[in-house]
Image (cartoon, rainbow, N blue to C red):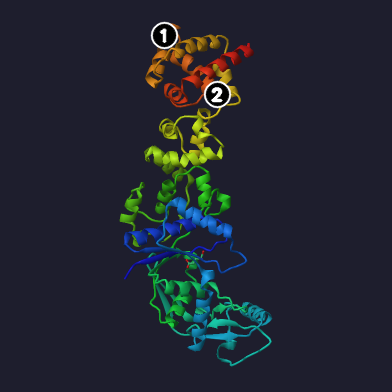
């Protein structure tokens, strides 16, 4: 039997990190078992589903590198099949038309609440052979009345629910459209899903779905319900805690492997290992090691992981992702050094790619103004002369490499009896516009001789205006 898992998002918003973690765990389980992973878009709620959201899901999956073997399937393409199953359930006596009106149901609910009973459908139409032609009936599943359903949950252990707690679920609305629990069951059955891995907000649906599957004579999948993700304040992770959409993490400068590594540890552990390559995740992942209780999202840790991957990933890989951010800043990458070289000198000081991009603008574009503080601290009377001497020397460098640039700076500092900082800092402000950059010799090498000289000239002229 091929292990088959699926990720089944409803396209009603962005791809939330909680959803991404569900997708990751399902993907990992399929990959580690040599099975298959399905992407299924649950778009039957026509009012709330949008193409934009479908795109966001596909984009998020692609950015994370979570590839699927089958799909994306769209539930809206399966309406005929759902109808067929609904009719089958009616024919075999496992479903029935219910003509109870909204008002009637509301009244029932009010009475039950007043009697301190749990609100549930009373089964009025269950055995009554009523046909009211002037009213569109809904269709309800005939849930067993006795016994219990035991969910053998791979994360939480057995969860036992008494059938008397479950009322007869609506599987088709008055307009004939199927409801969530029915469509999920039909697709999981048809797609031969062996492991349903999803958020624990679905636990309430599971016994109902198991009962429908039983009525259809289908084999039951195994279930693994993943605990919630909380914000630092203990509330369910949401927008007000910061970034929650996968693409927002991209926008904020995270590498997909950092987010994946963060998400895998959020609710799963393998000893006390923190850093996992994708291969290691696939090798070590076990549903049995998923935490039972909720986990708290920790931005600091994600940032730490991001820096780790920026430092250790192949520079070419980081450069590919950085180029997207440079594009956001509308920089012309052909106007400066190879991005991979920029990555190599910037990565130590950059925790995110947004930081790295912002700190690398001067390689590709003239800056418009000097940082005020940097000017105050490093451009003073006489600095123009230091820069003039530097200009003279830099002009003579035949082989524009960091080591030769370095020599020029050291020698000039010596000959003027200045410490290195007094030469290197004004030079840095002159070429970068600010007081922070990677090692000045490497910065100059990447910037190139022509641009360096032009910027030093510009700074000399600027300093003169200060006096
Ligand atoms: N479409 C459901 C959701 O987005 C998930 C269904 C499932 O995983 O069974 O919450």
Find disc 1 in the rendering and name its residue.
414
Looking at the image, do the residues carrying marks 1 and 2 touch, with CB atoms under 8 Å apart? Answer: no
Find disc 2 in the rendering and name its residue.
433
Could you tell which of marks 1 and 2 lies nearer the N-terminus?
Answer: 1
Q: Position of residue 186 (x, y in %)?
A: 47, 75
Residue 203 is marked as: none
Left or right: residue 108 compared with residue 323:
right
Residue 110 picture quarter: bottom right
Residue depth check, mark 1 versus mark 2: number of the one nearer the observer: 2
Q: Nearer the viewer, residue 185 or 396?
A: 396
Q: Nearer the viewer, residue 162 or 415?
A: 415
Q: Residues within 10 Å of mark 1 (few under 14, many from 20)?
A: few
Q: Position of residue 279 (x, y in %)?
A: 32, 51
Residue 124 picture quarter: bottom right
Where 17 sits versus 458, above or below?
Answer: below
Residue appearing at x 52%, y 37% in the figure: 326
Where 394 sits versus 115, above or below?
Answer: above
Q: Residues within 10 Å of mark 2 (few under 14, many from 20)?
A: many
Residue appearing at x 49%, y 80% in the figure: 85
Residue appearing at x 48%, y 76% in the figure: 208
Q: Nearer the viewer, residue 106 or 99?
A: 99
Q: Position of residue 394 (x, y in %)?
A: 45, 14
Q: Position of residue 189 (x, y in %)?
A: 42, 74
Query: Residue 238, can we see it?
Result: yes
Query: Residue 235, can we see it?
Result: no
Total marks drawn? 2
Q: Quadrant of the C terminus?
A: top right
Where 263 sits versus 450, above or below?
Answer: below
Residue appearing at x 60%, y 26% in the figure: 368
Where 188 sits versus 371, above or below?
Answer: below
């Amino acid at each position: 039997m091929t292990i088959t898992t699926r990720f089944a998002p409803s396209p009603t918003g962005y791809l939330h990190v909680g959803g991404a973690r569900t997708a990751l765990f399902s993907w990992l389980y399929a990959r580690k078992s040599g099975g298959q992973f399905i992407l299924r878009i649950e778009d039957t709620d026509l009012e709330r589903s949008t193409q934009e959201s479908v795109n966001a899901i596909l984009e998020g999956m692609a950015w994370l590198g979570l590839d699927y073997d089958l799909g994306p399937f769209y539930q809206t393409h399966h309406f005929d099949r759902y109808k067929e199953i609904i009719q089958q359930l009616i024919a075999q006596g496992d479903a029935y038309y219910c003509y109870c009106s909204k008002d009637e149901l509301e009244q029932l609910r009010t009475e039950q609440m007043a009697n301190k009973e749990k609100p549930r459908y009373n089964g009025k139409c269950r055995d009554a052979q009523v046909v009211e032609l002037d009213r569109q009936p809904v269709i309800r599943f005939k849930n067993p009345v006795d016994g219990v359903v035991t969910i053998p949950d791979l994360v939480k252990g057995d969860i036992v629910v008494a059938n008397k707690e479950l009322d007869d679920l609506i599987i088709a609305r008055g307009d004939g459209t199927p409801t969530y629990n029915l469509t999920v069951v039909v697709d999981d059955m048809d797609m031969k899903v062996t492991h349903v891995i999803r958020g624990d907000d679905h636990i309430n649906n599971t016994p109902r779905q198991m009962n429908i599957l039983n009525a259809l004579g289908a084999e039951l999948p195994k279930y693994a319900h993943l605990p919630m993700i909380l914000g630092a304040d203990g509330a369910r992770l949401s927008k007000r805690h910061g970034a929650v959409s996968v693409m927002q993490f991209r926008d904020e400068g995270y590498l997909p492997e950092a987010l994946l590594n963060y998400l895998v540890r959020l609710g799963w552990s393998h000893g006390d290992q923190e850093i996992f390559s994708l291969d290691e995740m696939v090798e070590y992942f076990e549903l049995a090691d998923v935490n039972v209780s909720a986990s708290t999202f920790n931005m600091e840790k994600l940032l730490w992981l991001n820096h780790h991957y920026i430092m250790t990933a192949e520079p070419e890989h980081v450069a590919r992702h950085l180029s997207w951010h440079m594009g956001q800043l509308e920089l012309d990458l052909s106007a400066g050094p190879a991005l991979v070289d920029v990555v190599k000198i910037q990565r130590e000081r950059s925790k995110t790619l947004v930081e790295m991009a912002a700190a690398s603008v001067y390689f590709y574009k003239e800056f418009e103004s000097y940082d005020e503080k940097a000017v105050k601290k490093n451009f003073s009377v006489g600095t123009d002369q230091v820069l003039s001497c530097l200009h003279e020397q830099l002009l003579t460098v035949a082989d524009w490499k960091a080591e030769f640039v370095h020599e020029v700076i050291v020698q000039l500092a010596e000959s003027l009896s200045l410490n290195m900082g007094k030469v290197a800092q004004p030079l840095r402000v002159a070429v970068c516009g600010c007081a922070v950059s990677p090692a000045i010799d490497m910065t100059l090498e990447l910037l190139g001789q022509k641009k360096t000289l032009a910027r030093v000239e510009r700074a000399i002229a600027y300093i003169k205006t200060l006096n």
